[in-house]
Image (spheres, coloured by chain):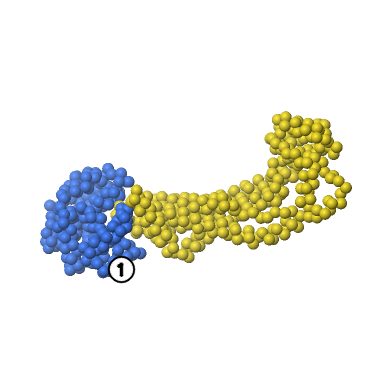
Chain colours: A blue, B yellow
């Protein structure tokens, strides 16, 4: 599903953020991408979601070569991914329901089906009854659940999360992790960037540890 | 196809939601654009009415060829044949002395004055239009006609028609210049409004992109927004012009009557109004497209 082969990423005027990075994530894997702040986790996330292109090397996501993708094809790749963003990026001018339904609207799904799927996604993350709320009125943990519902509403085979538990206390973080694991149990491939090295101990999974842009082990 | 239509419907619904979410700011923008439209349209209408009130005559210079009072049908036919054969003449119209008298009595304030005349003092005449409109060319044609048998007088109306023509053409250029300047001002207003819209919706654009929105999908609501803004401004300008003419008409009517003429102020025709709306929507669309080009 994801393959990094000799990937280097350098921003103008900086040292290499990623240096000759290689790894593969297969279908059905549950992978933690760990490392300190600045290790390159977010850059990996940006490469997978085609927000950036590699300076050299090859990034393959669902068979698409990110470095060679035409700009017009990128949106269609993103529709195949479930993205959970570090800064939530929830829209406070609309309800929880409308936030979650956004990826389906973008994909042009018929309204009735989109509403049905949105209700199902909110149910899976335990937010039934909060559909009409404004996200700003929710707690940090609930906002993260909204993000998760939005990521899975289009039923992606690959779920990529950038620090989904960063701003949550241990209790909320555990609950969010449980939801990720539920999706993993039904066949969804999960890749989660986190700087919390205790998470893989509490919730076992394959670990890719980044240190200064390269794999530490 | 269904998804494509659905996507457009969603964009349109989104546009409406944003359009009515800031009613005061939006009304002001529309009013400014409508005012921008009003000036050139008012100028255009003023020119159209001046032309009409100048007697309904063409601003093409004419040569008035008056036949002798005693000219009979044979002389008239001979002159007509010569006019037809003259290659410098574009067209001509015969005005009989009876028609001329009828026209005169319709134009003067007190037609009873003509009732006291012993007979019709007016001659038969031809109104001649030449291919070349310059004074020199007209004078040459006039000189030729003057030499034909049965011609009493040849009157070149080049002077007054030239003045009117210059006046109308200058007015048209002023209106065109005003139209271009205010069109650009409208464009700037629309671009500015749209840039503000883009700025206030940066987060929405970012999130939509992250979840697979194409550039077309991102731009579409803004383009609809520009077109809708243009539509409202065009309708407002049309309505304002119609109201202005309704108020102005009685006053102008009095002035026309005082000059012993008949006629009325004409407003925008349906075609003109639709063109105005089309232009306004076009500017809205162009402004929006310029504003979101980099979004």
Q: Position of residue A49 (x, y in %)?
A: 26, 51
For the question of whether residue A38 can be seen, the reply is: no
- In the figure, is residue B285 to the left or right of B144? left
Q: Residue furthest right?
A: B118
Question: In this figure, which residue is indicated by the disc labeled 1?
Answer: A133
Nearer-the-camera pick, B24 or A214: B24
- In the figure, is residue B48 to the left or right of A29? right
Q: Position of residue A25 (x, y in %)?
A: 16, 50
Which residue is depicted at the point 23% across and 57% down? Answer: A152
Q: Position of residue B144 (x, y in %)?
A: 78, 31
Residue B60: quadrant of the picture:
top right
Which chain's residue wears label 1? A
Q: Disc count in the image?
A: 1
Which residue is depicted at the point 29% across and 66% down? Answer: A131
- In the figure, is residue A99 to the left or right of B229? left
Nearer-the-camera pick, B262 or A150: B262
For the question of whether residue A172 can be seen, the reply is: yes
Helix, strand, or loop for circle 1?
Answer: loop
User: Is the residue marked by circle 1 packed among few (<14), some (14-19), or many (20+) residues within 10 Å?
Assistant: few
Which residue is depicted at the point 42% across and 55% down? Answer: B222
Residue B94: quadrant of the picture:
top right
């Amino acid at each position: 599903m994801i393959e990094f082969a000799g990937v280097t990423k350098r921003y103008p005027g900086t040292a290499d953020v990623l240096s000759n990075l290689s790894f593969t994530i297969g279908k059905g894997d549950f992978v933690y991408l760990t490392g300190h702040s600045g290790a390159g986790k977010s850059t990996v996330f940006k490469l997978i979601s085609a927000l950036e292109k590699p300076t050299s090397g090859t990034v393959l996501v669902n068979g698409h070569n990110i470095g060679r993708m035409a700009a017009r094809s990128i949106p269609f790749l993103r529709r195949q991914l479930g993205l959970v963003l570090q800064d939530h990026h929830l829209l406070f001018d609309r309800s929880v329901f409308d936030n979650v339904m956004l990826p389906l609207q973008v994909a042009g799904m018929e309204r009735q089906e989109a509403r049905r799927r949105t209700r199902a996604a909110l149910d899976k993350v335990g937010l039934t009854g909060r559909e009409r709320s404004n996200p700003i009125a929710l707690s940090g943990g609930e906002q993260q659940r909204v993000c998760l519902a939005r990521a899975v509403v289009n039923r992606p085979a690959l779920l990529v999360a950038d620090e989904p538990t960063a701003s949550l206390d241990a209790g909320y973080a555990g609950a969010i992790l449980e939801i990720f694991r539920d999706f993993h149990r039904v066949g969804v491939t999960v890749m989660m960037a986190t700087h919390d090295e205790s998470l893989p101990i509490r919730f076992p999974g394959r670990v890719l540890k980044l240190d200064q842009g390269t794999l530490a082990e | 196809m269904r998804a494509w239509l659905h996507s457009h419907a969603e964009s349109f619904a989104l546009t409406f939601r944003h359009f009515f979410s800031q009613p005061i700011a939006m009304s002001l923008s529309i009013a400014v654009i409508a005012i921008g439209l009003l000036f050139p349209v008012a100028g255009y209408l003023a020119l159209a009415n001046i032309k009409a009130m100048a007697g309904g005559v063409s601003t093409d210079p004419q040569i008035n060829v008056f036949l002798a009072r005693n000219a009979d049908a044979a002389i008239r036919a001979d002159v007509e044949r010569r006019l037809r054969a003259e290659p410098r003449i574009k067209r001509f119209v015969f005005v009989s002395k009876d028609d001329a008298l009828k026209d005169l009595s319709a134009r003067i304030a007190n037609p009873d004055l003509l009732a006291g005349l012993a007979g019709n003092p007016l001659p038969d005449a031809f109104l001649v239009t030449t291919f070349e409109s310059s004074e020199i060319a007209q004078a040459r044609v006039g000189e030729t006609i003057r030499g034909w048998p049965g011609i009493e007088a040849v009157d070149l109306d080049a002077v007054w028609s030239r003045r009117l023509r210059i006046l109308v053409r200058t007015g048209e250029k002023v209106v065109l210049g005003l139209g271009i300047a205010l069109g650009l001002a409208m464009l700037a207003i629309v671009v500015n409004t749209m840039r503000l819209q883009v700025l206030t919706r940066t987060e929405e654009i970012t999130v939509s992109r992250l979840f697979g929105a194409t550039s077309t999908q991102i731009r579409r609501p803004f383009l609809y927004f520009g077109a809708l803004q243009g539509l409202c401004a065009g309708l407002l300008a049309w309505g304002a012009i119609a109201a202005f003419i309704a108020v102005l008409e009685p006053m102008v009517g009095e002035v026309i009557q005082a000059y012993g003429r008949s006629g009325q102020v004409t407003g925008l025709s349906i075609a003109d109004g639709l063109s105005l709306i089309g232009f306004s929507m076009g500017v809205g669309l162009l402004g929006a497209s310029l504003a979101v080009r980099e979004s």
